[in-house]
Image (spheres, rainbow, N blue to C red):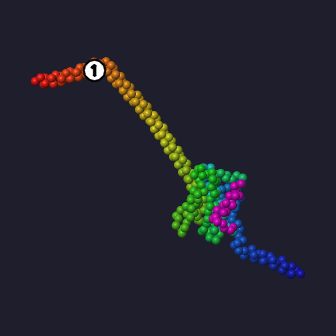
Amino acid sequence: MIKRLQRTILLPLIMLVMLVGFAPASFAASTYMPKFQPGQNVYLDPLLDGASPGVNLDGLEQKLDDAGRKHNIDFYFVMALKGSEAKTNQPFSQDRLDELYGKWSGAKGFNVSRSVIIYVVRLDTDWTKSSYAVNVSPGLAQEGLTGDSVFSILDKYGKNPNGGNPNALLPRAPRDFGATIAAESNALVDAFAARKVREAELAKQEAERQRLAEIQRQKDEEAARLRRIEEEKAAAERNAAIASFVKVFGGPILIIVILLFMFVRFRSAQTKARAIIK
């Protein structure tokens, strides 16, 4: 009876242990989805913390905190080991980040208006391969920071086809990768602000140029108006002088002209008469 009971209990127990011990990869755990903690910038999957090779993110928390203070932006870095979720049309890391953001966006203390989440997934079968995604608050676009602009920074330091990218920081230096993304994101904001200042200065200079041009135009118009007045005055004085001259000397001159004309006619007739008498 006891032996039969032992077989009844032990056999299923042994089978359960074997099933767990030799479970296929399809039963692997889901990808790390940490709960948001106010004041925490770095989240590392415990499976990576104790993996071989392990991941060391010491000091990144302070670097992200310091970077965030510059422009009041919350930088977050999450690194996880790839889980068993099914693939979709999106990159795996983007799917996981979308899922994470859905959980964090309503969390107390999470600033949806001024945050940048960097999400890195390391392949479970090859530690040298990883993918990444980033979520940038839409409001930061007004300061020159967008998802596309930050993702280009991720590509600059994350892509390393055939080992040909000397700037690559993944997979060997994820801590430097996170710090560099935050630093260069700040640089984008700085460059955008400097460009806006320059554009404002150029606009100010253009407005001043137009103001001075308008002043000069008004001066030119006034000078032309005064010249016209002077010319009209001079013409009026000439006409008045001519009218006065004609009024005073017009009659006598006309008489003289008539007398000269009559004298010429007389002389001409006299000459013809003398020619006939001869």
Q: Front-most of 240 and 225?
A: 240
Give x and y (percent) for residue 120.
Answer: 63, 63
Q: Going 64% across and 66% down the picture, which residue do you hit?
A: 89
Magenta stretch: includes residue 136: no
Instruction: Compare residues 113 and 237 and report the one nearer the observer.
Output: 237
In the picture as drawn, the residue positioned furthest to the left comes out as: 278
Is residue 59 among what the camera can see? no
Q: Residue at x 51, y 41 (%)?
A: 204
Q: Is residue 76 above or below residue 232?
A: below
- Residue found 67% across the figure and 53% down from its top: 112
* Count of marks placed on residues: 1
In reply to whether residue 98 is colored magenta, the answer given is yes
Left or right placement of residue 93 versus residue 228 in this view: right
How far from the left and from the top, in percent, is residue 269?
18, 23
Per the image, the residue denoted by label 1 is: 254
Q: Position of residue 59 (x, y in %)?
A: 62, 58
Residue at 36 percent across and 27 percent down: it is: 235
Look at the image and tell me in which quarter the N terminus lies. Answer: bottom right
From the viewer's side, name the closer residue of 237 and 3. Answer: 237
The reply to whether residue 155 is in sight is: yes
Locate residue 247 relative to residue 146 in the image: left or right: left
Circle 1 sits in a helix, a strand or a loop, which is it?
helix
Count residues near mark 1 (Cα–Cα under 10 Å), then give few for <14, some for 14-19, many for 20+. few
For the C terminus, give its image quadrant: top left
Residue type highlighted by circle 1: Leu
The residue nearer to you, when weighing 205 against 172, is 205
Pinpoint residue 232: horizontal percent, then vertical percent: 39, 27
Tell me the magenta residue range: 85-106
